[in-house]
Image (cartoon, rainbow, N blue to C red):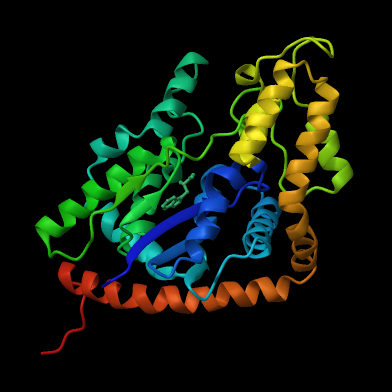
């Protein structure tokens, strides 16, 4: 039986937070240990350049994300963990796919359309500050996926359209040249929570409302204390389903623990107490990896070595497929 190949990328622009952990990192670490799966996880550093032109930030984020995944126990032998820029085959494929991608398809991409709309609303030229990187980003993402014949692509809802575009591009290539690419499918897990942030909106770096994953205990408690609540006093019953404190609790809790906290809310637990208990729950889960994270952050050479190990594995697959792709489009040595 050939193993199912799952593949996903993480753009290296931010510091991993609890929302990333619950929604993407934790399921990926679990998948990395599953011997029925062939998982590819990569740091999408060329994607970072689309929205970030601060070299320090790209470097720091790349290191933090790699250290986070390793500290949490990613199995880098049973999976392939690499940095996009270490696999030049991907960017080479990206150009070949660019030449097979209709401009009209890219015009329809949500991220690009949202940027145009924002310009129009601000009375700016529609093209203001829009780079070709932003415009053609779905092609790079298609190359990320197709270069490894990734089949299942775990992503957030905002990325479904890009995976569908990758599928369109693959179909077009297969039809015109040769059946070289597996058609990918987005996998949006319904049972993983999308966490709310400090202000009650979705936890996201762009809203500046995140709780970073690896904080000192003191900082973690401080962040949790900042979660927005209402003015209900201790003793007054509170609605768990309208509370970010409960929402985050639930994402880390067992069934029983969720039930317990529901009862506490009903009987009027004080916000301060609920937050204290939330701190304990999160700290029990991430605390053990914290020391390992700090160790790794102080040992860049080790992180680099892990990434190079991944790059070798990734390239050994990519180079074989790219050779076929080049031949299919007519880029080949002159033999006679
Ligand atoms: N664009 C994705 C995001 O912003 C990250 C990403 C890059 C990705 N390449 C990918 C995800 C390939 C899945 C497959 O979240």
- Number of numbered labels in the structure image: 0
Residue beneath the point at 70% across and 56% down: 60
Q: Which residue shows up at 63% across the image and 65% down it?
A: 73
**The N terminus lies in which quarter of the figure?**
bottom left
Q: Nearer the viewer, residue 138 or 76?
A: 76
Q: Is residue 207 left or right of residue 48?
A: right
Quarter of the image holding residue 235? top right
Task: Return the residue found at the far bottom.
Answer: 336
Seen from the viewer's position, the closer of residues 156 and 233 is 233
In the image, 72: left or right of 122?
Answer: right
Viewer-proximal residue among 234 and 206? 234
Q: Residue at x 74, y 67 (%)?
A: 296
Locate the C terminus and report the quarter of the image it occupies. Answer: bottom left
Q: Is residue 256 above or below residue 81?
A: above
Query: What percent of the width, then of the height, locates residue 82?
Result: 52, 67
Report the residue that reaches farthest toward the right: 218
Rendered image quadrant of residue 102? top left
Image location of residue 180, percent across then percent down: 19, 66
Percent from the top left, x then y, of residue 135?
Answer: 39, 40
């Amino acid at each position: 039986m050939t193993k199912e190949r799952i593949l996903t990328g993480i753009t290296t622009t931010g510091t991993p937070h609890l929302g990333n952990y619950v929604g993407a990192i934790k399921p990926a670490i679990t998948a990395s240990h599953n011997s029925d799966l062939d998982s590819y996880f990569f740091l999408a550093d060329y994607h970072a350049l689309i929205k970030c032109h601060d070299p320090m930030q790209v470097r720091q984020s790349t290191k933090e994300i790699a250290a986070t995944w390793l500290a949490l126990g990613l199995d880098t032998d049973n999976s392939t963990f690499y940095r996009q820029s270490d696999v030049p085959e991907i960017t080479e494929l990206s150009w070949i796919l660019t030449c097979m991608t209709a401009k009209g398809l890219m015009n329809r991409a949500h991220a690009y359309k949202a940027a145009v709309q924002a310009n129009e609303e601000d009375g700016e030229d529609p093209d203001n500050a829009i780079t070709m990187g932003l415009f053609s980003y779905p092609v790079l993402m298609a190359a990320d996926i197709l270069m490894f014949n990734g089949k299942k692509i775990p992503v957030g809802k905002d990325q479904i359209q890009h995976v569908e575009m990758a599928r369109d591009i693959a179909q077009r290539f297969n039809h015109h040249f040769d059946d070289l690419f597996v058609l990918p499918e987005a996998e949006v897990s319904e049972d993983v929570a999308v966490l709310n942030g400090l202000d009650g909106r979705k936890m996201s770096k762009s809203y500046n409302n995140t709780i970073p994953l690896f904080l000192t205990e003191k900082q973690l408690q401080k962040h949790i204390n900042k979660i927005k609540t209402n003015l209900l006093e201790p003793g007054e019953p509170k609605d768990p389903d309208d509370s970010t404190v409960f929402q985050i609790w639930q994402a880390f809790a067992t069934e029983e623990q969720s039930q317990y906290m529901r009862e506490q809310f009903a009987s009027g637990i004080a916000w301060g107490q609920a937050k204290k208990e939330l701190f304990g729950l999160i700290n029990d889960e991430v605390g053990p990896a914290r020391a390992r994270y700090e160790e790794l952050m102080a040992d860049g050479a080790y992180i680099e070595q892990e990434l190079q190990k991944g790059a070798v594995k990734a390239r050994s697959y990519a180079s074989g497929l790219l050779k076929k792709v080049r031949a299919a489009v007519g880029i080949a040595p002159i033999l006679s």
